[in-house]
Amino acid sequence: MNKEVDYIIVGLGLSGIAFAEQLVENNKSFVVFENASQVSSVVAGGVYNPVILKRFTPVWNGHEQLQKALPFYHRLEEKLNLTLDYSFTTKKVFTSIGDENNWFISSDKPMLTHYMNPRVQKERIEGVIGDFGFGELTGTGRIDTPLLVTAYKEYIKSHGNLVETAFDYEKLALDNDSVQYDNIRAKRVVFSEGFGLKKNPFFNYLPLNGTKGETITIHAPELQINFLLKGSVFVMPLGNDSYKVGATFNWTDKTSIPTEEGKRELEEKLQKLISVPYTVIEQSAGIRPTVKDRRPLVGIHPEYSQLAVLNGLGTRGVMVAPTVAENLFNYLEKGEKLDSEIDIKRFG
């Protein structure tokens, strides 16, 4: 017997969840295909920070994205009855006098004034190496993405909306205004597969690079910091004297297998940031869905308007997902314009 829905969503990372929530809010029916083959949303640090700390410049639309993202995650906290948002300050380790000057100049710029404290912190921080002081960012934090993905999966499973198998592209039959997949008929399919897009015959022409990122989790009882420390790696508090340290960028290895080289790189950088003993208790790896122009991949297939893509969220998926999911939904359902910076037509 045929099951009729408005949408099939393929993939349940941050983008899939954000689009599913758009459908829930607008009373649209859907099923999600998810086989846990892509883990970037689970492995990710989940940090939200609208300032690029390498150059002290604003993230593209970062302030506006956060205005939408934080209420989105707070609604999910209520819906799923759990804590997802852990806000903290971020302290950038300066490595030169020049850093201090650049920080002071940047902190006076529009948008950045919301987050950058113009006063440079000179006081020493126990266990932290920072001879040139620190710059402090407010309004930053992390979303517990592993917990979100696990809990949301259970939530839609309990509502009968989850299909826990890999999506088989060859089974997809396209009509003029709908699609058929096994016994499911839908108006549209939205592909949110992360790096899995490379195997998607409809959208694999898009320039999704994919960069492997590795993190380690350490236990460091003497560190005692309740903020995110940012140097050549980040050190993020997780509670119980545990900290996530990341992340590496590898453009050639496309596996989600942790490596000894990745661990070594992270530890070498970590030892230039902290001066207290620690133990590595975990190591993770995943492929970030990154795009060369650092903008998401959103839009409909040039030939098949029933097929849409929501992907390429890169390193800032936590911030950008709710905005681009809403933009795609309004484009598909209300005929609103798609932001040209994210529209896949730019790769025509």
Image: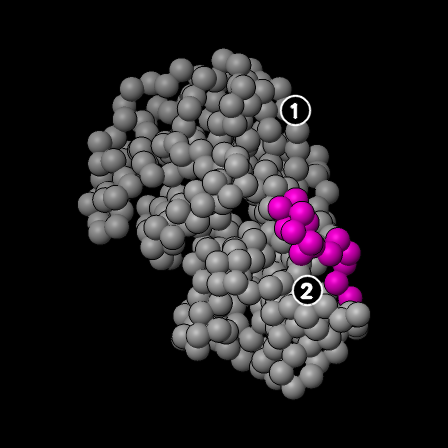
Say few, some or many: other residues with alpha carbon within 10 Å of mark 1 (under 14 / 14 to 19 / 20 or more). few
Look at 69% across and 54% down and name the residue there. Answer: 160
Q: Are marks 1 and 2 in contact (CB under 8 Å)?
A: no
Q: Name the amino acid, label 2.
A: Lys
Q: Specify whether residue 296 is in view.
A: no
- Residue 40 location (% of width, % of height): 62, 48
* Picture layout, residue 251 above or below residue 284: below
Nearest to the observer: residue 264 or residue 108: 108
- Find disc 1 in the rendering and name its residue: 281
- Circle 2: element type: helix
Say few, some or many: other residues with alpha carbon within 10 Å of mark 2 (under 14 / 14 to 19 / 20 or more). some
Q: Is residue 241 left or right of residue 63?
A: right
Look at 68% across and 64% down and name the residue there. Answer: 198
In the orientation shown, which residue stands out farthest toward the left? 108
Q: Is residue 115 left or right of residue 20?
A: left
* Picture layout, residue 210 above or below residue 222: below
Give the Cα separation between the discs numbered 1 and 2: 32 Å
In the picture, the disc for residue 24 is none
Q: Earlier in the sequence, mark 1 or mark 2?
A: 2
- Find disc 2 in the rendering and name its residue: 198
Stretch of the chain drawn in magenta: 153-169
- Circle 1: element type: strand
* Picture layout, residue 130 above or below residue 307: above
Nearest to the observer: residue 10 or residue 20: 20
Nearest to the observer: residue 233 or residue 146: 146
Q: Name the amino acid, label 1.
A: Ile
